[in-house]
Amino acid sequence: MERPTPALASIRAPSLAAGGEPSQGSSGPACLVCRSRKVRCDKAIPACRNCVRLCVVCPGYDEGHQNIPRNQMVKSTEDIFRAAGKEKRRIGSCEQCRDTKSLCTRNRPSCKRCILRGLSCVYRTKPDKSPTATQLSGRGTSIGGSQSQDLRSPNSAVPVIPGLKVDYQQLCSETLPQDAGLRSRLISTYFDRIHPLRCLAFIHKPSFLHALDCDTVLEDYGEPLLYIMCALGARLLFLDSVRSGALIHPLGPKIPGDTWAEKARKDVLSEAPVPSVQHLMALVLLCEYGLRTDQNAMVYVLCGYLFRAIQLLGLDSPHQRTTVSSVSSEILEGEVENRIVWACYQIDLLLASGVDRNSLWRGDFPTIPLPCSDRDFLSPIYVSPRFLPDDKDLDSLAVVGKLDLPSLVTVLIKIRATVLRLIRTTPPAEPNISDPSSPFMSLIQQLETFYKHIPDIFRLTPLNSYIHKEQNIAGAVFFLHMIYHAAVFDLTRISLAGFNFPLASALAGAPPNFRADCQKRCRFHANEVSNVIRQGFRHGSVTFDQPFCADVALESAKIQIIYTSTVANDAESVELTKTNLRTNLQLLKVLHAGMDGLSPYIRAIIPLCMIFGLQDIAVEWREHHISPDSQAEVTGSADIHHLSTMAPFRKARSEVRTKQVGSTGSETMSSGGPAGSPNTSILNQNQQPLYDLEERLPTHAQFCTTHQGPVVGAAHANHQPVYRMGAGGVSLITQDVSMLPEQQSMEDYIRTADEMGNYLTWDVSDLSELPPWITLDLPSLPS
């Protein structure tokens, strides 16, 4: 028997039997839930079976429901689901509209909302009811596709990686796959996506592939190096599938590549007393893997071992054998060792963030030639060595025009490290920061000279981007431009409120127009990062393969938020900032795909949006802001060298502390934190919590700003308590929220930004996490 159409089902009314129950074949209106879902309603009393199955309250069979408009019926149904603690799934919306709970026009191939915002519009496709593992392998999309499907076999819990045509467990096994084709693909992915980044191209690709074909790769390069190369390749393929929607995460307790990376780490460290060049290669790639998996503590430890091993092997001194009379093998060996050293140098500078005590090289650098061009590396011949240009000689930066990509990135990372070190330096008593010969202006000139001499082939033009993608260097080129813009706004952000680095005091006596110029320059380069991100989205996620792209996007967002609220608060500036924030947040969401929990980068931005008048952005991304300990920080305190919460060193310390607390048991965790933290001091003063567990702060609390400092208040109704945050906790200010303006003055925002380090950095040892009794829940969007 055919299933009746919704139109027929809706005109059947229940005829009550003796027991008061309606019969299944009775006529009359269906309940609202069944009508909105366009399914048959059995019209049972007191609730139909569909509503019972969905665990929602059945609205009944009122005759008036029959004439309710469709939009009002859908809204009423959503209210019923929401009251039951559920959410009615929207059918047919694209992924972007579904994630932001926005109304989707459902146009194919792209809805109007995605077209207006320049977003990637992807629709879910309905999977077959009972696909077999073989069918899934055959019709699986390639890596980077946009098709979504059920990836589990009905007979087993083993999912299939689309495009790879291999079981998920093959990439999570203890040993490398026996399939030569799969191993070849993993190695190819490594060489295409990891090898060109920064200065990681220290493996001579022809020699490695020759050893792989001759089955001598283990003897020539060692098992740990092969394992970590395959681990990086497997992780990239896995993340590509997750980001494209072709794979649903999580699939299991393991992530492809983790097991192989762990085996490589154990094997190479078991021979730590006898380091070799092959082991150093594996250790550098282990650091790269650790940066991608947020294992910052492990990366710091491995960097220390790498530095000492380089000294033991004498790789940080010039090689006498790389001369005109050297043979190809000697030239190749010397270049490999040079590139290993520069790779270690770059990782160290990126991790230290300008803090000398956290750096192994500190103000020093290797006195060895910069990496030669990739062309000369593939066919080793002697070339005249080039060294790092002198910081004090701008003319020496003209050599930039003759450098290849690995050397360009090396020079730029060194200049940026100098920038981060300078802003942490206390200026002299009477500084003249605007003088052309000052260190500040010298770095500005260095960066401008560097960018002026970048070879044309590495410019971000529309045609060049396709060339870079074809040459598998798109990720490296995009990172080069992102790190350049980051170096400029890292230096000039001291002109903005809230970025209270020691060098910022030198601007107090500077001419007003000089400070204004620094602010505009800072905003320009932060905006350029968003433009680079938009351009990169046109070429896929390969353009953001560098793990430090997230850090650059975060700092760009913070600067634009502070600039808009404290310098240029006009409508045009606010709208530009909102557009750029959406772009940066979208990148951070993409980069976090395949990882557990919510993105810490997004959770660091949303509170700043709430504080500085960009609440609509926070509402759009409210699903990323559900934790009471969300962090909002412009920059850290002086005690931790002004490192932000996302700095690798602070994340490494947090990781170590978390593991230490976890190993000591629940008693330590329940102690309320270290002595002297705001949590314990407040409780000791009152001998009881400020609020009951159910009433710590109003549900839907929001940050506001008054002349007395930042406050937390209720968001939905007037005559609700508003609390002011201070070093000693939260104090009551007013009962009437309507007395607080929705948009604060620029002076209030400047004061709030200046106080960020005081009231948002609660406890240095606990990484400035907000106390658990501070909530930043966001209101729901209006219907």
Image (spheres, rainbow, N blue to C red):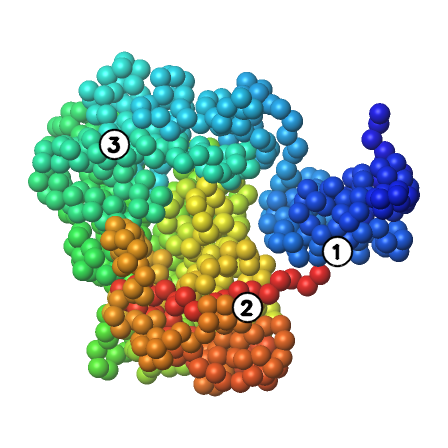
Using the rendered image of the protein, determine whether residue 694 is visible from the camera's viewpoint.
Answer: yes
Q: Residue type at mark 3?
A: Ala
445 or 88, which is in the foreground? 88
The residue at the far front in this view is 18
Residue 415 image offset from top left, x and y in percent: 28, 57
Q: How many marks?
A: 3
Q: Few, some or many C-alpha atoms within 10 Å of disc 1 (few <14, some 14-19, many ≥20)?
A: few
Depth check, front residue: 78 or 304: 78
Q: Callout 3: 10 Å neighbours few (<14), some, many (20+)? A: many
**Mark found first going from the N terminus, 3 or 1:** 1
- Circle 1 SS class: helix
Which residue, given by chain and number where applicable, does mark 1 sit on? Answer: 75
Above/below status of 468 relative to 429:
above
Q: Residues within 10 Å of mark 2 (few under 14, many from 20)?
A: some
**Kind of residue sitting beneath label 2:** Thr
Does residue 549 lie above or below 384 as drawn? below
Vertically, is 397 above or below 468?
below
Question: In the image, 5: left or right of 570?
Answer: right
Cα separation between marks 1 and 2: 23 Å
Nearest the eye: 31 or 297: 31
Q: Is label 3 or label 2 in front?
A: 2
State the residue at coordinates (80%, 41%).
41
**Of helix, strand and loop, which one carries label 2?**
loop
| Tag shown at residue 768 | none
Q: Residue at x 23, y 35 (%)?
A: 265
Residue 280: x and y, percent? 19, 36
Q: Nearer the viewer, mark 3 or mark 1?
A: 1
Q: Secondary structure at mark 3?
A: helix
Q: What kind of residue is marked 1?
A: Lys
Residue assigned mark 3: 264
- The residue under the point 83% across, 31% down is 3
Residue annotated with mark 2: 699
